[in-house]
Image (cartoon, rainbow, N blue to C red):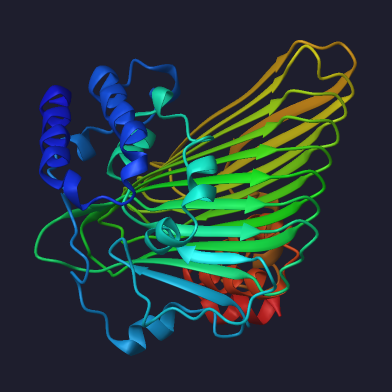
Amino acid sequence: MTSTAVEYYLSAFTQQKGKFIAPWFSDQRRAALDSFQQNGFPALRQENWKYTDVRSITKRNFILTEKGNGSVPKNQINSIRFNELDCHELIFINGHFSSKNSRIGNLPDGVILESLVIACDIHPDMLQKHLGNNANYTIGAFTALNTAFLHDGAMVYIPDDTVLEKPICIFYLSTETKHSFITHPRNLLILGRNAQATVIESYIGIENADYFTNSVTEAVIRAGAKLEHYKIQQESEQSYHIGNFMAQQEKDSRLESHSVSLGGKLVRNDITSNLAQPGASVTLNGLYMARHRQHVDNHTLINHLEPHTKSEEYYRGVLDDHARGVFNGKVIVHENAQKTDAQQSNANLLLSDNAEADTKPELEIYADDVKCSHGATVGQLDKQMLFYLRSRAIEEDKARSLLTYAFAEDVINRIKFVPIRKRLEDLVIGRLPDAALIREFAA
């Protein structure tokens, strides 16, 4: 099956290669395709994929979408926006940039906010310097596929000493089409020295739409810069989502990554941060909620490469029905990384006897002067707390919903950006019974 799937994408590449952007990217594209052909798709025997079977993806023949494939009513576009936010918006429909629906306001001097297709014409030198440098296609089939089939995405560049006050919202909307389709969104985020920006990636699917999103985001965070990054995944529960986020951090840089997964039939999120110079720090904050037969896999990797670097990681999962959640958080403290401070925590709440959580926190320490810890829990709702709420005349179903929200709220409250926190509160509460009651208590 894997061999057949590989052959399908090799054939699709041959048929589509004339439609890809940037001739100067062809060598990297070809190398990525060769790597994909050599290594194929991941299998359960591979340690990083032992809990996630991708055969439901590889047995399907997803087709590449054409620009303009899929019409979206204006009210549907408006419904996905953060209407309470004054932000810059890039909107992609079925993988292609929609200029008529996007809204980019006045930008400070030197700031670049464009689709990759446009940026290739206007800023080719910058793209040639950075695009693909941090996305290692040799160790990941899906990153290799994204690199080989790269056709559109977002480019963000913030010059030195520039603070972008307005957040950047990047929406990837997938609609129903005649055939099952695949998109390969690629985002390139570059923050100069002491620059600051907030970037929000939203992946949204129309209910029952059948498609596969294979996204890659590369972030370059220069010395003293700060990136606040959000990924909100609300794909159709009939869809598949594989996402890779890779960050390279310089001296005293700061990355805050907030990942929320609510949709998708099969979801895999990979996040890698390389703390490459002293003083760099990263916080990974994650929430995943799955129901029915959803499968959500979160893999994180933090490389402490130099002294005086810091990482914090907090992931929580809420699993119901026959859903399965996977968390694998790996922290590597390299030999030269003395004075490292690394903390990691993963907690999972099972709402059903049939739900399953697999958690694997990992620490590899090759330095001797460090402060590191990790922990993981899997459990059900606290019976004593349920009894307490029942004794206050709260019905059992409502009490369970309140406790479930309180569990998820621990992650949501770590989000300092109030409009995003409020949006996530609404999304999480909307997934639970008795939403009106929970909103009353949460107010």
Q: Quadrant of the C terminus?
A: bottom right
Relative to 273, does residue 91 appear above or below in the rendering?
A: below
Residue depicted at 62% across the width and 73% down the height: 394
Residue 286 visible at all: yes
Residue 8 position within the rendered picture, expressed as x and y whole percent measured from the top left: 11, 35
Q: Nearer the viewer, residue 109 or 162?
A: 109
Residue 152 position within the rendered picture, expressed as x and y whole percent measured from the top left: 35, 56
Relative to 333, does residue 220 appear above or below in the rendering?
A: below
Q: Nearer the viewer, residue 188 or 315?
A: 188
Residue 41 visible at all: no
Q: Quadrant of residue 178?
A: bottom left
Relative to 91, does residue 410 appear above or below in the rendering?
A: above
Horizontally, is 77 left or right of 177 in the view?
Answer: right
Q: Quadrant of the N terminus?
A: top left
Residue depicted at 72% across the width and 52% down the height: 192
Q: Give the number of callouts.
A: 0
Q: Nearer the viewer, residue 294 or 161?
A: 161
Residue 12 position within the rendered picture, expressed as x and y whole percent measured from the top left: 13, 41
Residue depicted at 48% across the width and 53% down the height: 187
Q: Residue furthest bottom?
A: 75
Relative to 124, does residue 398 appear above or below in the rendering?
A: below
Residue 216 position within the rendered picture, expressed as x and y whole percent measured from the top left: 44, 45
Residue depicted at 34% across the width and 15% down the height: 45
Q: Nearer the viewer, residue 232 or 412?
A: 232
Horizontally, is 211 left or right of 392 in the view?
Answer: left
